[in-house]
């Protein structure tokens, strides 16, 4: 199976600090892949480099066989990578529906067609009843769902989710997990997620990468990861083991 | 076409729009020349305000130098008319690319080199000021001595050459205002409009949604400049005189903005409503002071200041969103 996303010794430095240090991994088409690690481990920096929001200092990032290192974030999105932001940023003064229409217009020039598609996504993410509300009036869990909907509206092959479970109640987390699983199963969507909520990681991911101080300290199946002494020590803490 | 335009409007909104339009259509029959002249000024500001609103209200790019597009277009059309006898409508065809190109230069410099927000606004002022000072020393257009269009008594209105009485000018600017409204509504509800709003709301998130923000910001500046262009041509042919000091003056740019700010930035009807409220009230004040024999220079500016203050404090989104709710047409004006 060829890799949809491949990172080869990718690094990013901020002045003296090495935020991401020679990280390599590949994500095959259709996989759900999780990146975990303590705060400041470089997870979001890694995402920003993949999504084109930040340039890498070293290494190679390729998507569907082509390098994407030097692309701007809008060009990356047009290639088929959509992302959500850790600190959500919906378009506040637009309605929920219009937020998603913006994404849907990427592959549809016609606004009516985009609206139809947006509504289907809003139903899937259980936001349909709130479609006419202003995005700024939504609760945080709804705003996170809206970000996912807007990202999906661009019809990506790869979805990057930056802590979409944070701040959700356990039942809401389970709903989101179910929705993502369904999407992955039905459409073959590849998902890479940064997540602190281990409950979601265990339920979703088939493989996990652990970052600590910018270094990939472990990778493998979720079950193997939670038993890895290095991971337990640096991130999960003794009580998880 | 009317049916298509009214499509998506509630019956109530369509009725209100029809009443307003009808009132504007018959206004010159019942009003005197002074009143018609005031209405022309109002509609001119409503027109240019709508053009400015494309850039700021839709795409979120603050221009404080829209006078440059008015001035350039006015001069292009006026020079073609006085030197070569080319009429204003052909002149407009020449003025539009000039204004759009000027917008493209400003936009390119700003967006390519990451000049944004307040700094972008300052850049637009700088360009307008360059133009003012430049034209003040440009002999081809009579420099600071000013350019005059021949004024003669016309037996009849000449629409093709835009020579005639105020009533003719009134209908011309009314038609332009209506067309600009239709254009803005079409833009706003199309793909480009959605992209502009996304950029206005959060440029980084817009890019993450795959929008080439540079390109769409360029479109906004160029379309806004091109639409403003007709305002400049109209200005030249209505006032018949052009002085760089006046036409490129920053107060011209501010004048264009005020109506939209009062009426509601980013709304379709706000710039029109704002022009009526602001200029309408200011002229009423003027007439009242004249009537009572009060001579207070600068009263109009103070009045503008008070209006702005009241709106900023009481209705920070402008009068129109509030009025639309009152009229029960808020859904239509979204």
Image (tube, grey):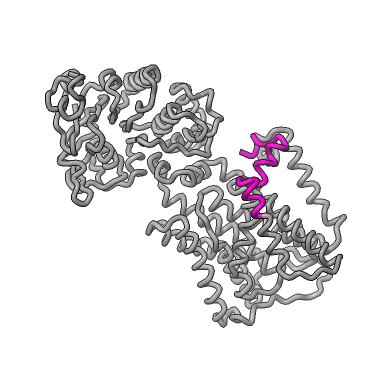
Toward the viewer: B88 or A228?
Answer: A228
Q: Is residue A141 above or below residue A86?
A: above
Q: Residue furthest left?
A: A229
In the rendering, at what x and y percent does residue A122 appear? 47, 25
Please tell me which residue is depicted at 60% across the width and 59% down the height of the picture.
B228
Please tell me which residue is depicted at 41% across the width and 58% down the height of the picture.
B115
Q: Quadrant of residue B286?
A: bottom right
Please tell me which residue is depicted at 12% across the width and 24% down the height of the picture.
A229
In the rendering, at what x and y percent does residue A27 appear? 22, 30
Q: Is residue B111 left or right of residue B326?
A: left
Q: Quadrant of residue A63?
A: top left
Count of labels shown?
0
Residue span colored magenta: B308-334
Q: Residue furthest front?
A: A239
Toward the viewer: A228 or B279?
Answer: A228
Q: Quadrant of residue B12?
A: top right
Residue B318 magenta-highlighted: yes
Please tell me which residue is depicted at 20% across the width and 21% down the height of the picture.
A222
Q: Is residue A160 above or below residue B249?
A: above
Residue A93 magenta-highlighted: no
In the rendering, at what x and y percent does residue A60 appear? 19, 43
Q: Is residue B176 visible?
A: no
Q: Is residue B185 left or right of residue A159?
A: right
Quadrant of the rendering where the C terminus of chain B is positioned: top right
Toward the viewer: B105 or B85?
Answer: B105
Q: Is residue B174 left or right of residue A14?
A: right
In the rendering, at what x and y percent does residue A154 appear? 40, 34
């Amino acid at each position: 199976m060829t890799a949809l996303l491949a990172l080869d010794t990718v690094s990013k430095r901020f002045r003296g600090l090495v935020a991401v240090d020679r990280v390599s991994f590949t994500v095959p088409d259709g996989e759900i892949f999780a990146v975990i690690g303590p705060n400041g481990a470089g997870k979001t920096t890694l995402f920003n480099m993949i999504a084109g929001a930040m340039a890498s200092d070293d290494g190679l990032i390729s998507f569907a066989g082509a390098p994407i290192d030097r692309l701007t974030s809008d060009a990356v999105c047009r290639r088929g990578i959509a992302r959500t932001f850790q600190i959500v940023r919906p378009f506040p003064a637009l309605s929920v529906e219009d937020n998603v229409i913006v994404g849907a217009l990427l592959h549809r020039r016609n606004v009516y067609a985009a609206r139809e598609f947006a509504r289907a996504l809003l139903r899937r993410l259980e936001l349909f009843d709130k479609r006419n509300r202003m995005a700024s009036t939504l609760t945080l869990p709804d705003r996170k769902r809206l970000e996912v909907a807007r990202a999906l509206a661009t019809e990506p092959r790869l979805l990057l989710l930056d802590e979409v479970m944070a701040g959700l109640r356990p039942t809401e987390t389970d709903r989101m997990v179910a929705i993502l699983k369904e999407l992955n199963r039905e459409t073959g969507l590849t998902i890479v997620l940064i997540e602190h909520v281990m409950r979601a990681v265990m339920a979703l991911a088939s493989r996990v990468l652990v970052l600590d101080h910018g270094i990939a300290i472990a990778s493998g199946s979720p079950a193997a990861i939670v038993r890895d002494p290095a991971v337990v020590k640096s991130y999960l803490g003794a009580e998880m083991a | 076409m009317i049916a298509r335009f009214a499509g998506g409007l509630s019956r109530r909104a369509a009725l209100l729009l029809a009443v307003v339009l009808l009132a504007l259509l018959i206004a010159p029959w019942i009003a005197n020349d002074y009143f018609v002249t005031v209405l022309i000024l109002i509609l001119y500001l409503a027109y240019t305000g709508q053009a400015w609103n494309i850039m700021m209200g839709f795409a979120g790019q603050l221009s404080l130098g829209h006078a440059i597009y008015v001035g350039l277009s006015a001069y292009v059309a006026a020079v073609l008319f006085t030197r070569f006898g080319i009429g204003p409508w052909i002149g407009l065809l020449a003025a539009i690319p000039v204004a759009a190109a000027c917008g493209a230069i400003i936009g390119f410099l700003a967006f390519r080199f990451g000049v944004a927000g307040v700094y972008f606004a300052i850049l637009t002022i700088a360009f307008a000021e360059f133009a003012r000072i430049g034209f003040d020393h440009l002999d081809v257009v009579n420099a600071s001595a000013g350019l005059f269009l021949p004024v003669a008594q016309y037996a009849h209105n000449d629409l093709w050459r835009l020579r005639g009485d105020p009533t003719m000018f009134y209908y011309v600017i009314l038609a332009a205002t209506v067309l600009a409204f239709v254009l803005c509504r079409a833009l706003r509800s199309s793909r480009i409009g959605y992209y502009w709003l996304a950029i206005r709301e959060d440029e980084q998130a817009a890019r993450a949604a795959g929008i080439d923000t540079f390109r769409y910001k360029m479109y906004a500046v160029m379309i806004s400049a091109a639409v403003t262009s007709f305002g400049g041509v109209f200005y030249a042919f209505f006032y018949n005189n052009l002085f760089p000091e006046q036409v490129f003056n920053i107060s011209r740019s501010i004048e264009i903005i005020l109506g939209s700010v009062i009426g509601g930035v980013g709304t379709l009807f706000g710039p029109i409503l704002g022009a009526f409220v602001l200029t309408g009230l200011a002229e009423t004040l003027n007439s009242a002071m004249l009537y009572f024999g009060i001579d207070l220079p600068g009263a109009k500016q103070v009045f503008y200041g008070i209006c702005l203050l009241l709106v900023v404090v009481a209705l920070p989104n402008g009068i129109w969103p509030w009025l639309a709710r009152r009229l029960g047409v808020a859904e239509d004006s979204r």
